[in-house]
Each structure stands twice: as C-alpha cells, then as structure tokens.
Image: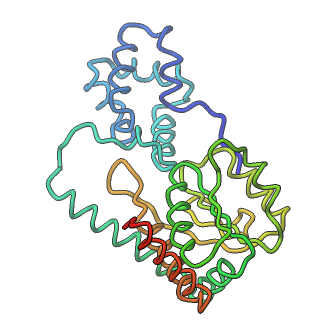
Amino acid sequence: MPASSTPSFVARIRAAMPDLHRSETRLAETILNFPGQLASYTATELAQIAGVSNATVTRFVRKIGYASFEEARQAVRAEQSAGTALMRVDSDSAGAEGKLARYLERAHLNLDQTLGALDDAVIGEIATTMRAAPRLWLIGFRAGQPFARYLAWQVLQVRSDVAVLPRDGETLAESLAAIDPADCVIVFGLRRPSRQLGPLLDQLARTAAQVALIGDLAGLESLPARWHLPCMTTGAGALFDHVGVMALSGMLASRVIGESGAAGRKRLSAIEGFHDSLDEI
C-alpha cells in the first residue's frame, strides 16, 4: 500500500512562506492557526477573516500549488478523511454543549457498523486458526500497535508462542524470516498507516501464512490477506473513534479463550498459580 509523496496542505504553505507578500503572509498565518477550517469556508469568508482581498486568496492558493480555492478545499477534506489530526481540530470551543451526546452516538454507530457486518463463521474460523497455529503473530503500526498488544496479551493466557511486531530494537525482516505457512498473523491496518504496511502485507503473502487484516483503510478488501475485517472509525472530534476495533479485538480474544479447551484451562490455572506465588495481583 504505497504512501503518497504529494506535499501536504500545511507543508505547501510553509514552503511558500518566504516568497509571500505581506497580505499573503497574513492569510497564511490565519490558515495555519486552524488549517482544517478551510474546508468549511468560502473564499470570501476566508478573505474577511484574514482581512485580505478575494484576489489575495486566489493568488495564495495558486502559489501553494492549487488551481483554485475549491481544489485547495478538496485537498484539506482529503487530509481530514485520511486522519490528520491537525486538519480535524476545531478552531474554538463553540458548540461544546452536546458534544458528549455526539461522541456517544458516533461510538454506537461505529460499533453497529463494525460488529453488524461480521460473519460469525469467519470469526470462528479466525479464532480457531489463532488458537491452533504453531505461532501467532500480532502486527500493528502507530494506532494499531496498542490493539496488537492487547489482543496478544489476552490470547497469551491460553496459548504460548505469541509475538507482537514490530519488536523493540529489531527490524521487521528479522521477525518475518521466522514466519511459516502454518502460522497465523493478525495485522491491524489503521489510518494513518506506516509506509511499511503495504510491503509487509506483500511479504506476508509470500510466506503463505494465514493472515487476517483488521482496519479502516480505503480499499482494505483489495489488500493481500486471507480474511478482511473492516472497522468503522469515524470520529466525532479531532481523533478517530476506535471503539469498534477494540470490540472486535475483545471478541476474537474471547473466542480463542473459549475454544482453548483443557489445554487452555491448564495454562490459565498455571498462570493463576504463579500470580499467587509471586504475589503479583
């Protein structure tokens, strides 16, 4: 999944700053305070806020590489959709009343749309593979890393040979070399992903391991994996809402633990025995 090398909206503005006229600089500074707000203003409204003319707005967007103000607005909207927090922050606290209700409503929708789209047979198949595979690998970059760690931590209660990647101080290649066709790999692909995600999935396909891809990326179903589990993460504020990802992770862990049988119970019992002897909990 190749990442775009196109300069971001903010990067374009910063690069152009040395060559801007005084009124254009004032406009640039206004936009840089809350760049995401550009998506909700007309050119005239932005000109009034910055105290410049409409002609200045037109010259400015052309200087930073856009053919029109509307093209610049579309670029901002695309970055908001991609998950750039800077582009999603509100310019003030207006409308704070009712925000809790909006967050709750958004979380409910994300849960409904994530879990409601799942096939119980597929979840069972993944859970069985996670339990029975010789080794289980959990991989997550950036926002995906804590979910990989959470799922590994829960499943580790009933099975051994569970690893989370990337590991501190190691390259991915050093771990990928150990993945076999019989292994199970769970990959979290969440916006905004590392550039390594696409090449990683290609390499995992070459290992012939059983791969499940969990995430909210556009075109998730087209990425190489045996199973695809899309999650809705639309946020009510500046950040994405990962309640659906968490629920799915918990569901998978519960299924694995529930299916672990006598071997799982034996391991759980041993863990509790060590908790007691070490007085850890």
Q: Quadrant of residue 255?
A: bottom right
From the viewer's side, name the closer residue of 268 and 114: 268
Vertical relation: 167 (above or below) 264: above
Q: Position of residue 3 (x, y in %)?
A: 66, 43
Q: Is residue 87 left or right of residue 256?
A: left
Q: Quadrant of the C terminus?
A: bottom left
Q: How is the image coloured?
A: rainbow
Q: Please report the residue visible at 54 percent of the width from the left and 52 percent of the height from the top.
A: 191
Q: Is residue 131 left or right of residue 90?
A: right
| Outermost residue toward the front in this view | 277
Q: Quadrant of residue 130?
A: bottom right
Q: Position of residue 177 (x, y in %)?
A: 82, 55
Q: Position of residue 222 (x, y in %)?
A: 71, 64
Q: Please report the residue visible at 26 percent of the width from the left and 25 percent of the height from the top.
A: 48
From the viewer's side, name the closer residue of 58 and 126: 126
Q: Position of residue 242 (x, y in %)?
A: 43, 62
Count of numbered circles on the image = 0
From the viewer's side, name the closer residue of 56 and 159: 159
Q: Please report the residue visible at 44 percent of the width from the left and 71 percent of the height from the top.
A: 277
Q: Please report the residue visible at 39 percent of the width from the left and 41 percent of the height from the top.
A: 39
